[in-house]
Image (cartoon, rainbow, N blue to C red):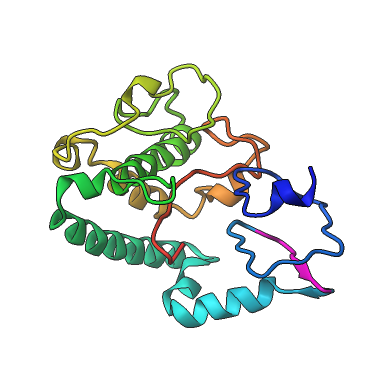
Amino acid sequence: MDEEQLRGATIRDVDLSGTRFVGVVAEHLEITGEFDRLEVNGVDVVPLVTAELDRRHPERARLRPTTVAGYQEAFTLLEQLWSDTVDRARGLDAALLHERVDDEWSFTDTLRHLVFATESWIGRVVQGVPSPWHPLSLPWEQMPPTPASPPTATRGPVSTRWWRCGPRDSPGSTRRSTGSPTTPSPRSARSPRDPGGRRRGSRSRSRTPSTS
Protein backbone atom coordinates (compact mmCIF):
# COMPACT_ATOMS: atom_id res chain seq x y z
CA MET A 1 0.00 0.00 0.00
CA ASP A 2 1.58 3.33 -1.05
CA GLU A 3 1.23 6.67 0.69
CA GLU A 4 -1.52 7.84 -1.65
CA GLN A 5 -3.67 4.96 -0.45
CA LEU A 6 -2.90 5.69 3.21
CA ARG A 7 -3.50 9.46 3.10
CA GLY A 8 -6.90 10.17 4.63
CA ALA A 9 -7.57 6.48 5.25
CA THR A 10 -9.43 5.03 8.22
CA ILE A 11 -7.92 1.79 9.52
CA ARG A 12 -10.22 0.03 11.94
CA ASP A 13 -10.17 -3.05 14.15
CA VAL A 14 -6.63 -4.24 13.43
CA ASP A 15 -3.85 -5.62 15.62
CA LEU A 16 -0.69 -3.61 14.82
CA SER A 17 1.51 -5.15 17.53
CA GLY A 18 5.17 -4.87 16.52
CA THR A 19 4.44 -2.58 13.58
CA ARG A 20 6.97 0.19 12.77
CA PHE A 21 6.27 3.38 10.83
CA VAL A 22 9.55 4.93 9.67
CA GLY A 23 9.95 8.29 7.95
CA VAL A 24 6.27 9.11 8.43
CA VAL A 25 4.91 12.57 7.63
CA ALA A 26 1.47 13.64 8.84
CA GLU A 27 -0.12 17.04 9.35
CA HIS A 28 -2.77 15.37 11.47
CA LEU A 29 -2.87 11.79 12.72
CA GLU A 30 -5.54 10.42 15.05
CA ILE A 31 -5.12 7.14 16.92
CA THR A 32 -7.64 5.57 19.31
CA GLY A 33 -7.21 2.18 20.92
CA GLU A 34 -5.40 0.35 23.69
CA PHE A 35 -1.61 0.38 23.89
CA ASP A 36 0.92 -1.12 26.29
CA ARG A 37 3.68 0.91 24.65
CA LEU A 38 3.47 3.49 21.85
CA GLU A 39 6.70 5.18 20.81
CA VAL A 40 6.71 8.46 18.91
CA ASN A 41 10.20 9.57 17.87
CA GLY A 42 11.69 7.28 20.51
CA VAL A 43 9.42 8.41 23.36
CA ASP A 44 6.82 6.11 24.93
CA VAL A 45 3.77 8.41 25.05
CA VAL A 46 1.41 6.00 26.84
CA PRO A 47 2.23 7.33 30.36
CA LEU A 48 1.78 10.90 29.11
CA VAL A 49 -1.60 10.13 27.56
CA THR A 50 -2.71 8.25 30.68
CA ALA A 51 -1.73 11.18 32.90
CA GLU A 52 -3.59 13.67 30.69
CA LEU A 53 -6.74 11.52 30.58
CA ASP A 54 -6.59 11.15 34.38
CA ARG A 55 -6.29 14.95 34.67
CA ARG A 56 -9.36 15.42 32.49
CA HIS A 57 -11.32 12.66 34.20
CA PRO A 58 -10.04 12.19 37.79
CA GLU A 59 -12.53 9.37 38.37
CA ARG A 60 -10.45 7.13 36.06
CA ALA A 61 -8.03 6.42 38.91
CA ARG A 62 -10.88 4.81 40.86
CA LEU A 63 -11.58 2.52 37.91
CA ARG A 64 -8.26 0.67 38.31
CA PRO A 65 -9.01 -1.18 41.57
CA THR A 66 -6.81 -3.82 43.16
CA THR A 67 -9.07 -4.92 46.04
CA VAL A 68 -12.62 -6.22 46.42
CA ALA A 69 -13.64 -2.98 48.14
CA GLY A 70 -12.07 -1.08 45.28
CA TYR A 71 -14.06 -3.05 42.72
CA GLN A 72 -17.27 -2.36 44.64
CA GLU A 73 -16.48 1.34 44.75
CA ALA A 74 -15.62 1.36 41.06
CA PHE A 75 -18.88 -0.34 40.14
CA THR A 76 -20.86 2.15 42.21
CA LEU A 77 -19.12 4.95 40.31
CA LEU A 78 -19.87 3.32 36.96
CA GLU A 79 -23.52 2.90 37.92
CA GLN A 80 -23.79 6.60 38.71
CA LEU A 81 -21.99 7.74 35.56
CA TRP A 82 -24.08 5.50 33.36
CA SER A 83 -27.30 6.47 35.13
CA ASP A 84 -26.54 10.13 34.41
CA THR A 85 -25.85 9.27 30.77
CA VAL A 86 -29.10 7.33 30.37
CA ASP A 87 -31.09 10.12 32.03
CA ARG A 88 -29.66 12.57 29.52
CA ALA A 89 -30.41 10.21 26.64
CA ARG A 90 -34.04 9.91 27.69
CA GLY A 91 -34.48 13.57 26.80
CA LEU A 92 -33.27 13.09 23.22
CA ASP A 93 -35.35 12.40 20.15
CA ALA A 94 -35.56 8.67 19.39
CA ALA A 95 -33.88 9.17 16.00
CA LEU A 96 -30.77 10.56 17.71
CA LEU A 97 -30.55 7.51 19.94
CA HIS A 98 -30.20 5.31 16.85
CA GLU A 99 -27.92 7.67 14.92
CA ARG A 100 -24.38 6.62 14.10
CA VAL A 101 -21.71 9.33 13.99
CA ASP A 102 -18.53 8.68 11.99
CA ASP A 103 -19.74 5.08 11.57
CA GLU A 104 -19.51 4.47 15.31
CA TRP A 105 -22.22 2.71 17.27
CA SER A 106 -25.32 4.63 18.26
CA PHE A 107 -26.27 5.14 21.90
CA THR A 108 -28.76 2.27 21.73
CA ASP A 109 -26.18 -0.03 20.11
CA THR A 110 -23.72 0.82 22.88
CA LEU A 111 -26.26 0.16 25.61
CA ARG A 112 -27.13 -3.23 24.11
CA HIS A 113 -23.45 -4.14 23.78
CA LEU A 114 -22.71 -3.23 27.40
CA VAL A 115 -25.45 -5.66 28.45
CA PHE A 116 -23.87 -8.31 26.21
CA ALA A 117 -20.44 -7.70 27.76
CA THR A 118 -21.81 -7.97 31.29
CA GLU A 119 -23.68 -11.17 30.48
CA SER A 120 -20.56 -12.61 28.84
CA TRP A 121 -18.14 -11.94 31.71
CA ILE A 122 -20.44 -12.31 34.70
CA GLY A 123 -23.02 -14.75 33.36
CA ARG A 124 -20.80 -17.03 31.30
CA VAL A 125 -17.32 -16.77 32.85
CA VAL A 126 -18.07 -16.19 36.53
CA GLN A 127 -21.45 -17.88 36.97
CA GLY A 128 -20.93 -20.59 34.34
CA VAL A 129 -24.22 -20.03 32.50
CA PRO A 130 -23.76 -21.53 28.99
CA SER A 131 -26.01 -19.01 27.23
CA PRO A 132 -26.69 -15.99 29.47
CA TRP A 133 -27.59 -13.53 26.70
CA HIS A 134 -30.86 -11.66 26.29
CA PRO A 135 -32.23 -11.73 22.70
CA LEU A 136 -31.54 -8.00 22.32
CA SER A 137 -27.97 -8.14 23.63
CA LEU A 138 -25.63 -6.95 20.88
CA PRO A 139 -22.34 -8.79 20.18
CA TRP A 140 -19.37 -7.03 18.68
CA GLU A 141 -19.73 -6.62 14.92
CA GLN A 142 -16.93 -8.98 13.86
CA MET A 143 -17.95 -11.77 16.23
CA PRO A 144 -17.78 -15.16 14.49
CA PRO A 145 -20.74 -17.55 14.77
CA THR A 146 -20.88 -18.76 18.37
CA PRO A 147 -23.30 -21.42 19.68
CA ALA A 148 -26.18 -19.99 21.70
CA SER A 149 -25.06 -16.38 21.14
CA PRO A 150 -27.65 -13.65 20.47
CA PRO A 151 -28.87 -13.90 16.86
CA THR A 152 -27.54 -11.37 14.38
CA ALA A 153 -31.14 -10.69 13.33
CA THR A 154 -31.44 -8.35 16.31
CA ARG A 155 -28.88 -5.94 14.85
CA GLY A 156 -30.21 -2.53 13.91
CA PRO A 157 -32.62 -0.10 15.61
CA VAL A 158 -34.87 -1.44 18.34
CA SER A 159 -37.56 0.28 20.36
CA THR A 160 -36.24 2.44 23.17
CA ARG A 161 -38.83 0.70 25.37
CA TRP A 162 -36.17 -2.01 25.63
CA TRP A 163 -34.47 0.12 28.27
CA ARG A 164 -37.42 -0.52 30.53
CA CYS A 165 -38.47 -4.06 29.56
CA GLY A 166 -35.02 -5.50 28.75
CA PRO A 167 -32.75 -7.43 31.14
CA ARG A 168 -32.45 -5.62 34.44
CA ASP A 169 -30.42 -8.07 36.51
CA SER A 170 -27.03 -7.32 34.92
CA PRO A 171 -26.11 -4.64 37.49
CA GLY A 172 -27.26 -6.89 40.32
CA SER A 173 -25.27 -9.84 38.99
CA THR A 174 -22.17 -7.68 38.66
CA ARG A 175 -22.50 -6.27 42.16
CA ARG A 176 -22.95 -9.76 43.64
CA SER A 177 -19.85 -10.94 41.79
CA THR A 178 -17.70 -8.04 42.96
CA GLY A 179 -18.72 -8.85 46.53
CA SER A 180 -16.80 -12.13 46.62
CA PRO A 181 -13.04 -12.05 47.35
CA THR A 182 -12.62 -15.24 45.31
CA THR A 183 -14.36 -13.91 42.19
CA PRO A 184 -11.85 -13.65 39.32
CA SER A 185 -11.71 -10.27 37.65
CA PRO A 186 -12.14 -10.06 33.86
CA ARG A 187 -8.40 -9.37 33.57
CA SER A 188 -7.42 -12.51 35.47
CA ALA A 189 -10.02 -14.63 33.68
CA ARG A 190 -9.09 -13.39 30.22
CA SER A 191 -7.97 -15.96 27.69
CA PRO A 192 -6.88 -15.66 24.01
CA ARG A 193 -10.59 -15.50 23.18
CA ASP A 194 -13.03 -13.71 25.43
CA PRO A 195 -16.51 -15.08 26.31
CA GLY A 196 -17.87 -13.83 23.00
CA GLY A 197 -15.12 -15.42 20.94
CA ARG A 198 -13.24 -12.18 20.25
CA ARG A 199 -9.51 -12.35 19.59
CA ARG A 200 -7.19 -10.27 21.69
CA GLY A 201 -6.60 -6.94 20.06
CA SER A 202 -10.06 -6.76 18.47
CA ARG A 203 -12.27 -3.85 19.33
CA SER A 204 -15.97 -3.09 19.49
CA ARG A 205 -17.13 -0.31 17.25
CA SER A 206 -18.60 1.73 20.04
CA ARG A 207 -17.95 4.90 21.97
CA THR A 208 -18.53 4.43 25.64
CA PRO A 209 -18.24 7.03 28.43
CA SER A 210 -14.83 8.65 28.54
CA THR A 211 -14.13 7.24 31.97
CA SER A 212 -13.41 3.79 30.61
Task: Determine the residue located farthest toward the bottom in the rendered image.
Answer: 55
Query: Where is 171 relative to 153, above or below?
Result: below
Picture residue at 27% right of the left edge, 65% below the top: 80
Name the residue at 31% across, 31% down.
Answer: 156
Quadrant of image for the N terminus: top right
Against 142, residue 65 (above or below) is below
Q: Is residue 44 left or right of residue 200?
A: right
Q: Quadrant of residue 122?
A: top left
Q: Position of residue 94 (x, y in %)?
A: 16, 45
Question: In percent of the image, x 23 and y 33: which residue is there?
Answer: 158
Location of residue 60 with respect to 12 vertically, above or below: below
- Please identify the dominant SS of the magenta region: loop
Of residues 127 and 153, the one nearer the viewer is: 153
Give whichever of 188, 100 is nearer the camera: 100
- 100 left or right of 56 in image: left
Write down the region rendered in magenta. 35-41
Please say if 156 is above or below 102: above
Point out residue 30 in the picture as x, y percentages from the top left corner.
60, 63
Magenta span includes 3:
no
Residue visible at 58% across and 36% down? 194
Residue 159 in percent (x, y) is at: 17, 35
Q: Nearer the viewer, residue 202 or 134?
A: 202
Q: Can you give x and y, in whole percent of width and height, for residue 141 in the image?
A: 48, 33
